[in-house]
Image (cartoon, grey):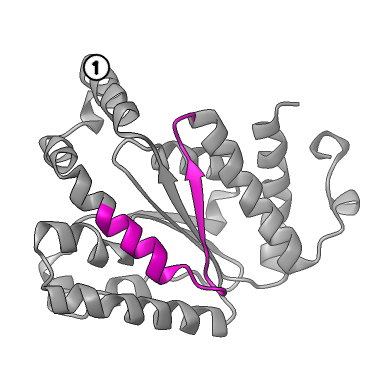
């Protein structure tokens, strides 16, 4: 059995452990445009019981959301006990796109590092299991993927003018990313930085980290719950 399929099978079994132990599992994904976040999430959830997992692609806030604190829209989408929730982009938009594009003042995004760290501590103190992933690709690899999307009619919808504009600000986004990783990589909520130039490697690495983290939290006897194909 291929490594990806092996870990998908393990995660399918572990979903039942999440339910049994009533653990609210929250995963969030950040990374460069075209880094493969969507593909990693698709492989991560593809074999799960859809009744117990929700994926939220996070875009620009609505007018109603803008009238509230930026963390409010995430509070309303947190997982219930025994449920898995995945954010494709997250509250880290405050210190990434909102910082670079000027949607937040310097005071707001500077203040956000401590606000986010406190928010994540609150979640963990409330028994949430939190896993954070940043998928990194090189600037050259991003350009190659942009051109591939541009030429492929089945992928062209993934590429927007905004993606090209963001690429022109690569250095600014890189600085913002480095600050984010340095200031929010805490002992209780560490970042998992995934090398994404190889999509296959990134997908396997993500699901491997997820399964091993759940095994540890649930104190799983792997030989007992996994079928032979998953060992």
**Apparent side of residue 117 relative to residue 209 in the rendered image (left or right):** left
- Residue 75 in the image: above or below residue 197: below
In the rendered view of the protein, which quadrant contains the C terminus?
Answer: top right
Say whether residue 112 is visible: yes
Element class at badge 1: loop
- Residue 69 in the image: above or below residue 56: below
Q: Position of residue 68 (x, y in %)?
A: 18, 80
Residue visible at 80% across and 38% down in the picture: 230
Comparing 18 with 156, the one in front is 156
Is residue 185 a member of the stretch shown in magenta?
yes
**Apparent side of residue 199 relative to residue 6 in the rendered image (left or right):** left
Comparing 104 with 72, the one in front is 104
- Residue 139 in the image: above or below residue 71: above
Q: Position of residue 94 (x, y in %)?
A: 24, 67
The image quarter containing residue 204 is: top right
Residue visible at 26% across and 55% down in the picture: 175
**Apparent side of residue 126 relative to residue 166 in the rendered image (left or right):** right
- Residue 2 in the image: above or below residue 72: above
Comparing 196 with 3, the one in front is 196
Is residue 31 a member of the stretch shown in magenta?
no
Say whether residue 90 is visible: no
Q: Position of residue 15 (x, y in %)?
A: 66, 56
In the rendered view of the protein, which quadrant contains the N terminus?
Answer: top right
The image quarter containing residue 145 is: top left
Disc 1 designates what residue?
153
How packed mark 1 is, by other alpha carbons closer than 10 Å (few <14, some 14-19, many 20 or more), is: few
**Apparent side of residue 109 relative to residue 44 in the rendered image (left or right):** left
- The magenta stretch is 175-198
């Amino acid at each position: 059995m291929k490594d990806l399929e092996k870990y998908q099978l393990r995660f399918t079994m572990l979903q039942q452990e999440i339910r049994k132990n009533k653990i609210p599992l929250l995963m969030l994904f950040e990374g460069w445009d075209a880094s493969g976040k969507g593909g990693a999430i698709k492989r991560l959830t593809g074999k799960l019981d859809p009744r117990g997992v929700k994926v939220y692609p996070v875009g620009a806030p609505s007018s109603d959301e803008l009238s509230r604190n930026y963390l409010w829209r995430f509070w309303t989408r947190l997982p219930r006990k025994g449920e898995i929730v995945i954010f494709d982009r997250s509250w880290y938009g405050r210190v990434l796109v909102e910082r670079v594009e000027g949607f937040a003042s310097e005071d707001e995004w500077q203040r956000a590092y401590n606000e986010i760290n406190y928010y994540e501590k609150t979640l963990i103190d409330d028994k949430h299991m939190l896993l954070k992933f940043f998928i990194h690709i090189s600037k050259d690899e991003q350009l190659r993927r942009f051109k591939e999307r541009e030429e492929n009619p089945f992928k062209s919808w993934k590429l927007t003018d905004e993606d090209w504009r963001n690429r022109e600000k690569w250095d600014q986004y890189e600085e913002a990313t480095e600050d984010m990783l340095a200031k929010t990589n805490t002992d209780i909520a560490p970042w998992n930085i995934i090398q994404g130039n190889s999509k296959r490697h990134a997908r396997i690495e993500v699901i491997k980290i997820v399964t091993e983290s759940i095994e540890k939290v649930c104190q799983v006897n792997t030989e007992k719950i996994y079928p032979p194909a998953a060992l």
